[in-house]
Amino acid sequence: MAHIASDPALDIEPDFVSATFEGIRNRIIGNTQTTHDEAANELITGWWQDRDICLAAWTVQENEATWLAAEATHIEQEHIDQECLLAEQEAEIECKEMEKKKPKINDFKVGTSVSDTLTHHPSQYAIHKLKSFEYIELWYFSPDGCKDTANEAKSSVDSTFGFTKVDDFIALKAVAAFKPSRKAIQDHSLEWRQFNMAKNSFLLYINKLKWPEKHQCALTMFFMNVVSHPQCSEPFGEQALLLYATCVCRDWHDTLTLDNAFNIGIFSSTLLKNLAEEVWNKTCLESLTEVHYPFSEH
């Protein structure tokens, strides 16, 4: 059925007895004995039958329209709810990201006071090297290296600053924090006492910085092998062991970068023997040079 524009219940019954419908009544009467009143009644009956059909169709049409409107409202509400949910999820993710970027402060023990003596710490340069798992001279962890860091911190001579990235921000930081110290000493040039103390501090800091346990164990074994080796009681034995420690540590870090590192905890007696000969030859050459120079002046 075609779309019904208005409610059939509001339609008014036509006056089929009027002169307006006389022509229609005459066609109904025709050659029959039907009166005009009877013809008008037939028209009235037909009109009411048609009205009932239209009214039923109108009810179906209105019900369908109501259902479609409700369905459209439901779909629209679902869309709005989905958008709100996505907005809430995005806001929650953004909030979590902002929370991650907020500066964090560690806890402290309520009943603990400051120590009676203050321990000097390695420089930020040395700590940065450890965090990056890069080679760093043990001198930075020795008492002399830590004392030098404390003196640098008290000095206001170096006021040069550089840019550093902190999360999504650019900040200024003293360039000294990223520079190696001019006073740094190579491991093989350390005194045996300095080496022994520095390696303890070094092992402590790699533990604090959460180096892999496997690497910590290997380095601990490495230093134990060096300081407890019988060679240290031999002539120039300490120099040979210090040179061994320097060369092996550097090579180990280099091979870590190339992802083909060896186990530094396994001691190489052959390498130590070769390095001991190198130290002995160098010492002999220096002795000969010292003897030669006085004679060459005459």
Image (spheres, rainbow, N blue to C red):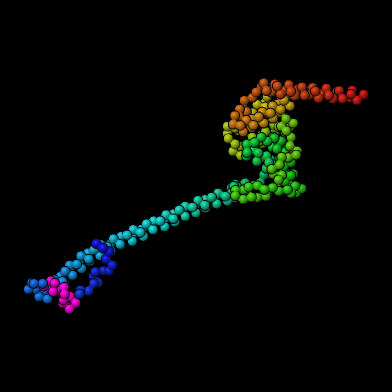
Q: Is 74 above or below relative to 108?
A: below
Q: Quadrant of the N terminus?
A: bottom left
**Residue at position x 26%, y 69% in the image:** 7
Identified at 69% across, 23% down, the residue is 272
Residue sitting at the far right: 298
Q: Is residue 124 left or right of residue 44?
A: right
The residue lying at 64 percent from left, 35 percent from top is 203
Give the magenta range: 17-29
Q: Residue furthest left?
A: 33
Q: Position of residue 142 (x, y in %)?
A: 71, 36
Q: Position of residue 209 (x, y in %)?
A: 61, 39
Q: Position of residue 115 (x, y in %)?
A: 67, 44
Tell whether 136 sits left or right of 102. Answer: right
Which quarter of the rendered picture does the C terminus lie within?
top right
Secondary structure mostly taken by the magenta-highlighted segment of the chain:
helix
Q: Image height check: is 284 above or below 110?
A: above
Q: Nearer the viewer, residue 172 or 21?
A: 21
Residue 105: in sight, yes or no?
no
